[in-house]
Image (cartoon, helix red, strand yellow):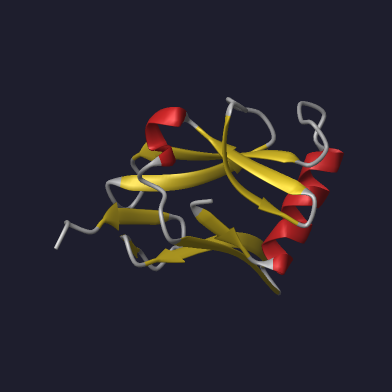
Amino acid sequence: MNVYITPTAASELMRLSLVSQDGIAGKMFLGVTKGGCASWSFSVSASGNLETPISRSNGLTLFTEKAQANNLKNITMDYIENLAGGSFVFSGKEIHVKPCGNCFEFKPNQ
């Protein structure tokens, strides 16, 4: 699979899939869209195209659009909490993530 989901992120994704009215338990969607503070940004939702799985962890399957599946290689998805709340953060060898944790640039092929 293309995306490594930490146990903390898997737990939060599972929680979100269970409480969402539009979702299916154990299935979440990772969107990649243009915009934000960089060329690209990640979004996480319970609804989306559930035909291209990119990761499985702790009973949860993460999906994305087929067109983006090959771009999402060697990425780690984590979840952090602090006094202000919680958020998913991303890291990886193929992307340069901005300080917000959700926006990124694809690194040029070397």
Res. 74 image quadrant: bottom left
Q: Position of residue 108 (x, y in %)?
A: 17, 57
Answer with left or right where residue 11 lies relative to residue 99.
Answer: right
Q: Position of residue 42 (x, y in %)?
A: 47, 47
Answer with left or right where residue 63 lies relative to residue 96.
Answer: right
Q: Position of residue 5 (x, y in %)?
A: 62, 60
Vertical order, 81 against 109 (above or below): below
Answer with left or right where residue 72 lies relative to residue 55.
Answer: left
Answer with left or right where residue 23 lies relative to residue 77.
Answer: right
Residue that lies at the very extreme toward the front in this rendered image: 1
Residue nearest the observer in this picture, 22 or 62: 62
Q: Residue at x 72, y 67 (%)?
A: 8
Residue that lies at the very extreme toward the bottom in this rendered image: 82
Residue nearest the observer in this picture, 53 or 92: 53
Q: Position of residue 89 (x, y in %)?
A: 53, 63
Quadrant for the C terminus, please.
bottom left
Vertical order, 105 against 89 (above or below): above
**Total number of numbered discs in the rendering:** 0
Res. 95 image quadrant: bottom left
Q: Residue at x 35, y 45 (%)?
A: 71
Q: Residue at x 38, y 30 (%)?
A: 67
Res. 81 image quadrant: bottom right
